[in-house]
Image: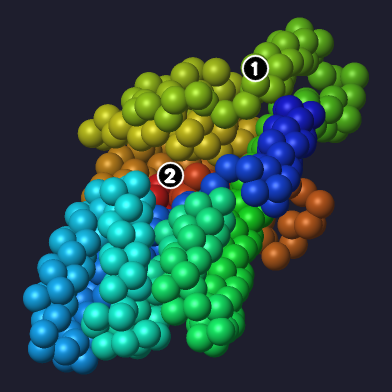
Amino acid sequence: MLARATTELRQSRSHAKPSRIAMSSGSPLGSVEAEFLTTARRFAAPVRGVGLLFISAFGLLAVPDDTMSLGFALLGLVVVGAVVDIVTAISGRAAPLALGFAIARVVAICATQEWTGGQPNQWALNALTTTAITLQWEWPPKVAIPATAGLLAVDLAVVGFGEGGTTVLRLLVECVVTRLTFVLLRRSSRRVDVLRDRRAALERAEALALERHRREREYLALLHDTASATFLLVAVHGRDTDRAQVAGYARHDLTALTGSAGGPTARDSPVDLNASLHAVVQRSPLTVEAEWRDGPLVPASVALALVRAVREALANIERHAGVDNAALSARREGDGVVVEVADTGLGFRLDEVPHSHRGIRGSVVERMTAVGGGAVVTSRPGAGTSVRLVWPDR
């Protein structure tokens, strides 16, 4: 059992490492990085479209009256391009049609500077820089860089290299800053994905460690209920021990230990608690006065914990109470169950039980706590002992 839990923990750790390496190498996209890229590409086109609408509206004010028709034509092209940009955003991906309109708008505005306010003019410069900046967020460098260089070449061909020096510097600085910002934000989102993967791996490892610890406690409790109890019986009674009885105990212990090594119940399906407890009563050497009510159904793991706790309580009565009878009751209480085991034997003081004795603490209290239940043991010398098991614990 313990080896199996350790193997599962190691497998979890080995599965967690490749995902972190893959993320750090940038191969698959994490959820945060993918969301960042989707958002950046979705909003870049509408920002460009709306921005160019405002730039063109103000640019139209500087167009001479005799070329106003050309200005309105350019404004119409910008409006159509803005519609294409918005449709592209709704589709959720960068479309070649939007890229084509982005290039066509800037080429048309730059090529007609001579008639729309002189060259160079702010309409063309702002349209060029706005388009170049949004391309850095919308498209990868292999597309954005050639497109930006081509637009800059068109503008320089119109205004000349002497007049376009300032334009080159401004465009270069803005594009570099934009691209660096994009890269840094993308790396930050990728880092968030890596940290999320690491946290998830740690949570899986912690869950497996807790499960391994729970199985260890369960195994120790089962060991106490079976083999340790049999050894104690032989040690106390010595040669007076019935060999056939000891052999029967040993066979039962072996069955219990090997049968539980496969781990917890695969399916926590509802189980008839009364039927499970009835089997414990039949196997007990004590005369048990059982009282069954309502026939409660509980999850299999809960039934297992209750059965083993009751079995340990009956075993303690047999070994230590000095009586050969006990009382057992099981009933439904609200949406839970209550099981009580009582005797009228010698009793004991709870505070005098050595910490090394795991019977009450390990086989009863911890076992019930592990499934979300509770156990209360009441005893007093000369007044017997009562064990009350409750699930769920409130």
- Answer left or right for 242 relative to 209: right
Q: Which mark is residue 259?
A: 1
Query: Which of the 4 quarters of the picture holds residue 126?
Result: bottom left
Q: Amino acid at mark 1?
A: Gly
Kindly identify the residue that appears in the image at 29 percent across and 48 percent down.
97
Q: Position of residue 281 (x, y in %)?
A: 48, 24
User: How many marks overall?
Assistant: 2
Q: Is residue 112 above or below residue 119?
A: above
Q: What is the spatial separation of the Cα atoms under label 1 and label 2, in whole angstroms?
A: 27 Å
- Answer left or right for 183 relative to 37: right
- Answer left or right for 356 relative to 23: right
Tags 1 and 2 in contact by the CB under 8 Å rule? no
Write down the residue under mark 2: 340
Instruction: Kindly state the secondary structure of the residue where label 2 is placed.
Output: strand
Instruction: Kindly state the secondary structure of the residue where label 1 is placed.
Output: helix
Q: Position of residue 205 (x, y in %)?
A: 68, 47
Q: Position of residue 123 (x, y in %)?
A: 31, 83
Q: Amino acid at mark 2?
A: Glu
Q: Quadrant of the C terminus?
A: bottom left
Q: Is residue 150 above or below residue 267?
A: below
**Would residue 346 be seen by someone viewing this image from the given angle?**
no
Q: Quadrant of the N terminus?
A: top right
Kindly identify the residue that appears in the image at 48 percent across and 33 percent down.
301
